[in-house]
Image (spheres, grey):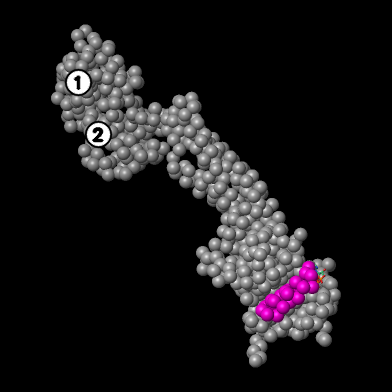
């Protein structure tokens, strides 16, 4: 039974430059256009420095493109107010960063709950149970009360994965989510993403250098020097 | 909706404070020292001033309303006329305040006055046997006057009983005339009348001048003696806020046309001393407050830099600028509040030590308002001090912040 695909994200002519108008202007992204559907499970690949993280930041509404338009769930985002972009980001986008980033002042469980708490305030019983469920999925149910500095790099990365999923986002962006993981954990995380995609119909985009991982994805988007390479 | 989100702001702010425990403890101690100094100095100076004022003004009117001085009326002349005047200043005879009964009714209505006490007073000679002393006759309306000066507390012999022929005299005068309670003396005002009165009580106010000269009697008895039937010469007034006395006096002057003398005008030196003292304590408070504010600001600035990456993560996971701003403002407020709680406790201890083991010259009360305002002010200072670092945190670019190492 195939589900109807709906468009989650569409990029039209996205460009990103740093230091615009200055002698050291760097053009990182050039005229990038593509879209992601709720059935998409895509890999973003490309050599180091090709602009993958930059593109992910733009797609995640963390960064503003220099030119072009980005539609999230059909809404044009370039004209949105900062507040509105923040809200959309918090509700609809799950992020796993290239370097695991947790907040040291909170334990693993609270880190996972953070997106929900920032958006809705005090978490409900249901929220907490869901966070526990996600931690179980990434194999950390016993470490829910540990602080980040009491976890290994790979464990922290898995907490970050659970955090990205907790708000059941429409778009999941992951920058080398398995970079620090052993192959078994990497497979677990990969499977979890797959499962989320099916259960919640979210578009998934993974940046990865791992050939095996990218070939396991349904679709590959290749970036080279800030330009899309048609396969 | 908003309030629900604030729950998280509290959570994060508290977690940051707990996480940076060393910093939190240090700045709390810093704020506490500042607050303790401010509260202690304020309480000390308030206690001291209250004591000085009580000693000086305790039994005095804050404002005296008097009939204005009589002046010569010089007829106006047409322009261009040279006008030479040789003027003899007029002698000021004893006169009654006009319409004082109505005035009394009007003054009783005012909320800024606590006591309104009319009296008639003038000079007389007190005589017993060969002893003659010049005295001041003071005819009072006892129920009103006792609110100004509760003579009952100062009676050393006899009792407060005026009316009919009964009068009260000071201990010094009693000594000089060699009289005791029950004795009779003759009062001569130099007018047509003289009277023999009975001494019902002897008071000692502790002010030699008053104890040697004052003779209290009922207003109705004093009026005919001073040839002022139905009249009063002075209305003594006490006000709620003694530092407003001069302003109130001027208002009363404009309203009634009477001469209004406030204690501030007649005790210029004292007032100067008090305001100089207030000024210097205010300076101390401002400087201590400023250093507390700078302390909080610098601790938070360091914290913003240290937490740059975490701020970026919070932003990326859905925290708005406003939330980041609130998280840091809250930390400032909490630094202020924590410090103030400790500081108030310390100042309480200091005051207790001062009151129990100090020189014992006077007692320092700590007003509950002082504590409430110290806490509130410390929180506001904390928020104010946090404003700059909090703005910096809120304006961090999330992408840059996440990259920050
Ligand atoms: N703030 C910035 N100012 C100037 N240039 C920048 C800035 N951020 C990134 N760049 C440049 O943009 C280019 C793309 O960087 P990006 O981090 O997106 O690469 P990447 O594809 O994610 O590489 P990697 O695989 O190593 O993570 C790089 O050449 C980088 O130097
Ligand atoms: Mg990268």
- Taking the spot 73% from the left edge, 75% from the top edge, the residue there is A188
Residue at far bottom of view: A1
Residue at far left of view: B164
Above-or-below relation of A100 to A50:
above
| Residue A133 appears left or right of B215 | right
| Residue occupied by mark 2 | B144
Element carrying mark 2: helix
Residue span colored magenta: A171-196
Q: Nearer the viewer, mark 2 or mark 1?
A: 1
| Residue B149 appears left or right of A63 | left
- Taking the spot 17% from the left edge, 29% from the top edge, the residue there is B220
Q: Chain of mark 2?
A: B
Q: Quadrant of residue A221?
A: bottom right
Q: Is residue A62 magenta?
A: no
Q: Quadrant of the C terminus of chain A?
A: bottom right
Above-or-below relation of B196 to B315:
above
Query: Ligand 1 within 8 A of label 1's CB?
Result: no
Give coordinates of residue B173: x percent, y percent: 27, 15
| Residue occupied by mark 1 | B200
Residue nearest the observer in this picture, A39 or A162: A162
Residue nearest the observer in this picture, A208 or B85: A208
Residue nearest the observer in this picture, A155 or B157: A155
Task: Decide which of tag 2 and tag 1 comes sooner along the chain.
Answer: 2
- Taking the spot 65% from the left edge, 58% from the top edge, the residue there is A105
Above-or-below relation of B185 to B49:
above
């Amino acid at each position: 039974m195939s589900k109807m695909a709906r468009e989650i994200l569409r990029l039209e002519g996205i460009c990103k430059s740093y230091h615009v108008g200055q002698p050291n202007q760097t053009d990182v992204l050039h005229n990038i256009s593509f879209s992601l559907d709720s059935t998409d499970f895509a890999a973003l690949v490309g050599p180091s420095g090709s602009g993958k993280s930059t593109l992910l930041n733009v797609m995640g509404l963390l960064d503003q493109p220099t030119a072009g338009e980005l539609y999230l769930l059909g809404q044009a985002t370039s004209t949105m107010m900062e507040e509105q972009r923040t809200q959309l980001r918090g509700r609809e986008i799950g992020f796993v960063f290239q370097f695991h980033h947790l907040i040291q002042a909170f334990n693993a469980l609270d880190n996972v709950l953070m997106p929900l708490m920032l958006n809705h305030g005090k978490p409900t019983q249901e929220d907490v149970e869901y966070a526990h469920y996600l931690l179980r999925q990434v194999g950390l149910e016993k470490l829910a009360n540990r602080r980040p500095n009491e976890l290994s790099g790979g464990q922290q990365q898995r907490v970050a994965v659970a955090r990205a999923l907790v708000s059941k986002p429409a778009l999941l962006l992951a920058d080398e989510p398995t970079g620090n993981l052993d192959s078994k954990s990497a497979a677990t995380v990969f499977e979890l993403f797959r499962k989320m995609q099916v259960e919640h119909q979210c578009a998934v985009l993974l940046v990865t250098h791992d050939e095996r991982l990218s070939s396991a994805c349904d679709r590959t988007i290749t970036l080279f020097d800030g330009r899309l390479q048609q396969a | 909706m908003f309030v629900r989100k604030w729950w998280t702001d509290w959570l994060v702010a508290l977690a940051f404070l707990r996480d940076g425990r060393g910093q939190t403890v240090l700045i709390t101690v810093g704020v506490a020292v500042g607050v303790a100094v401010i509260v202690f100095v304020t309480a000390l100076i308030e206690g001291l001033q209250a004591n000085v004022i009580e000693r000086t003004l305790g039994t005095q009117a804050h404002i005296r309303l008097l009939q204005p001085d009589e002046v010569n009326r010089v007829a106006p002349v047409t322009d261009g006329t040279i006008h030479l005047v040789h003027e003899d200043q007029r002698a000021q005879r004893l006169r009654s305040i006009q319409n004082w009964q109505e005035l009394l009714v009007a003054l009783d209505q005012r909320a800024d006055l606590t006591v309104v006490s009319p009296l008639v007073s003038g000079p007389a000679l007190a005589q017993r046997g060969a002893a003659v002393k010049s005295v001041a006759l003071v005819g009072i309306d006892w129920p009103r006057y006792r609110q100004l000066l509760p003579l009952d507390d100062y009676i050393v012999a006899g009792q407060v009983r005026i009316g009919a022929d009964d009068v009260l005299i000071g201990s010094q005068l009693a000594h000089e005339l060699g009289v005791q309670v029950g004795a009779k003396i003759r009062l001569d005002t130099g007018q047509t009348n003289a009277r023999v009165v009975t001494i019902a009580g002897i008071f000692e106010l502790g002010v030699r001048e008053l104890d040697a000269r004052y003779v209290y009697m009922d207003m109705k008895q004093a009026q005919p003696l001073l040839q002022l039937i139905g009249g009063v010469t002075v209305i003594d007034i006490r006000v709620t806020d003694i530092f407003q006395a001069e302003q109130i006096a001027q208002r009363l002057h404009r309203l009634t046309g009477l001469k209004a003398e406030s204690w501030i005008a007649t005790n210029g030196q004292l007032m100067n001393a008090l305001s100089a003292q207030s000024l210097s304590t205010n300076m101390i408070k401002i400087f201590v407050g400023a250093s507390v504010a700078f302390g909080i600001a610098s601790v938070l600035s360091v914290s913003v830099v240290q937490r740059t990456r975490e701020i970026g993560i919070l932003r990326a996971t859905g925290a708005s600028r406003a939330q980041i701003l609130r998280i840091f403002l809250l930390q400032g407020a909490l630094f202020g509040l924590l410090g103030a709680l400790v500081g108030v406790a310390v100042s309480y201890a200091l005051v207790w030590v001062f009151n129990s083991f100090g020189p014992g010259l006077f007692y320092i009360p700590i007003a509950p308002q002082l504590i409430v305002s110290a806490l509130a002010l410390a929180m506001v200072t904390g928020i104010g001090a946090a404003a700059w670092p909090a703005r910096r945190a809120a304006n961090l670019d999330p992408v840059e912040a996440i990259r920050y190492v």
